[in-house]
Image (cartoon, coloured by chain):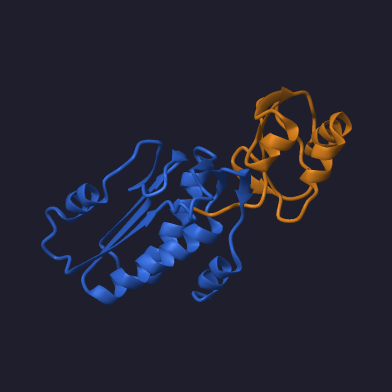
Chain colours: A orange, B blue
Amino acid sequence: MARVLLFGRFRDIAGWRERDVQAATLFDLRTLLAGEDPDFGMALTGPGVQVAVDQTIVRGDMPLGPRAEVAFLPPMSGG
Amino acid sequence: MILLTEAPFDPGTLLTAFSKGRTETGAIATFTGLARAEHGSTAILELEAYPGFTEAAIGKIAAEAKARWTLHDLSILHRVGQIAPGDPIVFVATAAGHRRAAFEACDFLMDYLKSRAPFWKKEHGPDGARWVEPSAQDHADRDRWG
């Protein structure tokens, strides 16, 4: 079970900010979210989007532990 | 000190506290950013951070400033949440033996905060709300530092 966090415009697109999702890998999680909500799935593949697992930016796929925190980060605004 | 806060702050009070008890610091530079009304188009600025992650990212920027310049101390305070036009949104202070390091480190920190810090900014105005991304100028300002 991964805790999924959304930030910025992703919250507006998906309509939620935090959810627990059952997924063994980051790839599975993306596939599941895109299957539920294709618009949000498209937004996640946009330019400048980053993903953090347990507060570290990751690239590509990786396994998700039972209490993994996955954050989808749209392009940052700066302060 | 690196701190995110939802509460309004007074830059004068922060500067007084930051300056206190320093006998070898010859120079303190500060920058205070205020939320702009954009001529009526922004009634409220909403700034979102990722708690823990955002402070850690700012910490890396601060460590880079300390590696580039000889600083005695630095302080970064950033508002999050709902911010009204005219309210201070960011305060940066740097302390050094001499002014050049203090000025340059403060300038550097702001350029990185404006372009690279993990914040998501939404402007709420009479025509609705919109998410803001860094401007080309923000990126150019950051690129000055190599």
Q: Quadrant of residue B83?
A: top left
Residue B113 position in % (x across, y down): 48, 58
Residue at left offset 30%, top offset 43%: B9
Nearer to me, B78 or B97: B78
Nearer to me, B71 or B119: B119
Vertical order, B35 against B115 (above or below): above
Residue at left offset 66%, top offset 31%: A68
Residue B139 position in % (x across, y down): 57, 68
Residue at left offset 84%, top offset 32%: A37
Nearer to me, A35 or A70: A35
Left or right of A53, for residue B39: left
Residue B62 position in % (x across, y down): 41, 58
Left or right of A57, for residue A31: right
Figure disc tally: 0
Vertical order, B121 against A54 (above or below): below
Q: Residue A1: in sight, yes or no?
A: no
Left or right of B5, for residue A57: right
Q: Residue A4: in sight, yes or no?
A: yes
Residue at left offset 76%, top offset 41%: A62
Residue A8 position in % (x across, y down): 63, 42
